[in-house]
């Protein structure tokens, strides 16, 4: 058991499993004065380092590597030759020859093993950074809180700033949401400083705010199933259509330019408390599967909010998941291409 895990347990954390952590205080929506602090145990970091790291990644990922300059932390995806996602994540440049990739922890080893087959031809090493901890902050006051308590300026969306031996990121959302990737000893100190002004809460709250931001992270059970566009990844700036070839690029580009994306990420909710599993079918009135659930989280008010990959064709209502009628909600962004080149120059 790591010092980081012991520290969290000493401060009231209960580990349901490797991916889920809870505290006695569970808040879904902070007030104007309140900030939430959560250990994001469902995330992990893969380090890609070496003299050929940039060249290696340029041929593997949907991000334009020259944009990952230590300021812009590019949302990206890794695909099969058929354009199906093996992982999506956020790519940070740490120094000239070292990158960190933030991704779902269930995909850390599968993606590392996949990339290792190609890494042997490059001067590059792939290292799971198990010594890092990932923390999340949510709330109107968190940019000022990080500046006051950690002496770091908060970045804008999809940007990064250095903090000690780690990085601070900002993810999209109606409320400011900061991600801290820190060495575990630094994470302990940061937690102690931040917890004086923030409420400790489980990582289910972070998932809920991901859902409300229309942001889905691929898990291992859904690997090799969807084009990046089926996660609305181009609407979030996660695909560069201006870079050269990478694995799956031809299929991803063809689907975009020919308008052949027949499934899209949608947001909904239902009344209840039981969370459906990832991959659960969204069923129409005729009993036909019309989509797959990607992620679900309780809103703390007797409802469950979800993101699901749905067919773009008309379907017979009502739609249900695990027998529960679904109410569809608007996404917080239009389904339009957002070039990462624009995000990088505009500051997120």
Image (spheres, helix red, strand yellow):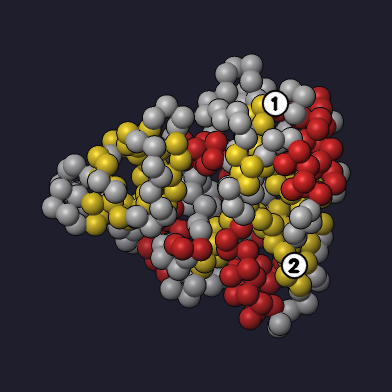
Q: Measured from the top left, where is residue 82 in percent x and y? A: 43, 73
Q: Where residue 286 is drawn, which disc sits there?
A: none
Relative to 137, residue 182 above or below? below
Q: Using a 10 Å C-alpha cutoff, classify the residue at mark 1 as few (fewer than 14 neighbours), some (14 to 19) or many (20 or more).
A: many
Residue at 38%, 57% in the rendered image:
279
Left or right of 151 on screen, residue 335: left
Left or right of 171 on screen, residue 260: left
Q: Which residue is mark 1?
A: 198
Q: Measured from the top left, where is residue 301 in percent x and y? A: 42, 27
Q: Which residue is mark 2?
A: 127
Left or right of 113 on screen, residue 242: left
Residue at 73%, 79% in the rendered image:
122
Q: State the residue in front, 278 or 126.
A: 278
Residue at 77%, 24% in the rendered image:
196
Furthest-left residue in view? 286
Instruction: Decide if residue 266 is in sight here.
Output: yes
Q: Secondary structure at mark 1?
A: loop
Q: State the residue in front, 340 or 324.
A: 324
Q: State the residue in front, 24 or 106.
A: 24
Q: State the residue in front, 324 or 77.
A: 324
Q: Measured from the top left, where is residue 328 in percent x and y? A: 30, 37
Q: Measured from the top left, where is residue 281 in percent x and y? A: 30, 55
Q: Using a 10 Å C-alpha cutoff, classify the residue at mark 2 as few (fewer than 14 neighbours), some (14 to 19) or many (20 or more).
A: some
Relative to 285, residue 140 above or below? above
Q: Secondary structure at mark 2?
A: strand
């Amino acid at each position: 058991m790591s010092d980081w895990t012991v520290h969290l347990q000493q401060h009231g954390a209960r580990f349901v499993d490797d991916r889920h952590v809870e505290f006695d205080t569970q808040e879904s929506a902070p007030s104007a004065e309140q900030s939430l602090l959560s250990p994001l145990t469902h995330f992990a970091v893969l380090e890609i380092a070496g003299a050929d790291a940039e060249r290696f990644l340029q041929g593997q990922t949907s991000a334009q590597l020259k944009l990952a300059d230590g300021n812009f932390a590019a949302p990206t995806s890794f695909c099969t030759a058929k354009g199906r996602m093996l992982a999506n994540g956020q790519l940070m440049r740490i120094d000239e020859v070292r990158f960190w990739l933030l991704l779902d922890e269930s995909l850390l080893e599968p993606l590392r093993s996949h990339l290792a087959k190609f890494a042997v031809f490059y001067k590059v090493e792939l290292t799971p950074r198990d010594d890092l901890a990932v923390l999340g902050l949510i709330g109107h006051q968190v940019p000022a809180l990080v500046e006051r308590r950690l002496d770091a300026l908060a970045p804008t969306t999809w940007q990064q700033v250095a903090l000690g031996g780690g990085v601070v990121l900002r993810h999209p959302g109606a409320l400011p949401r900061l991600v801290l990737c820190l060495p575990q000893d630094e994470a302990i100190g940061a937690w102690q400083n931040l917890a004086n002004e923030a409420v400790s809460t489980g990582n289910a709250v972070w998932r809920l705010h991901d859902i409300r931001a229309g942001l889905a992270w691929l898990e291992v059970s859904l690997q090799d199933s969807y084009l990046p566009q089926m996660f609305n990844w181009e609407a979030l700036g996660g695909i560069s259509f201006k870079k050269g070839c990478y694995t799956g690029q031809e299929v991803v580009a063809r689907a975009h330019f020919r308008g052949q994306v027949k499934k899209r990420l949608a947001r909904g909710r239902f009344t209840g408390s039981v969370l459906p599993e990832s991959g659960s079918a969204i069923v129409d009135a005729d009993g036909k599967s019309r989509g797959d659930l990607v992620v679900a989280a309780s809103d703390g008010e007797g409802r469950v909010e979800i993101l699901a990959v749905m067919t773009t064709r008309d379907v017979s209502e009502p739609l249900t998941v695990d027998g529960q009628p679904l109410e569809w909600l608007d996404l917080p962004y239009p389904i339009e291409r957002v070039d990462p080149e624009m995000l990088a120059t505009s500051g997120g």
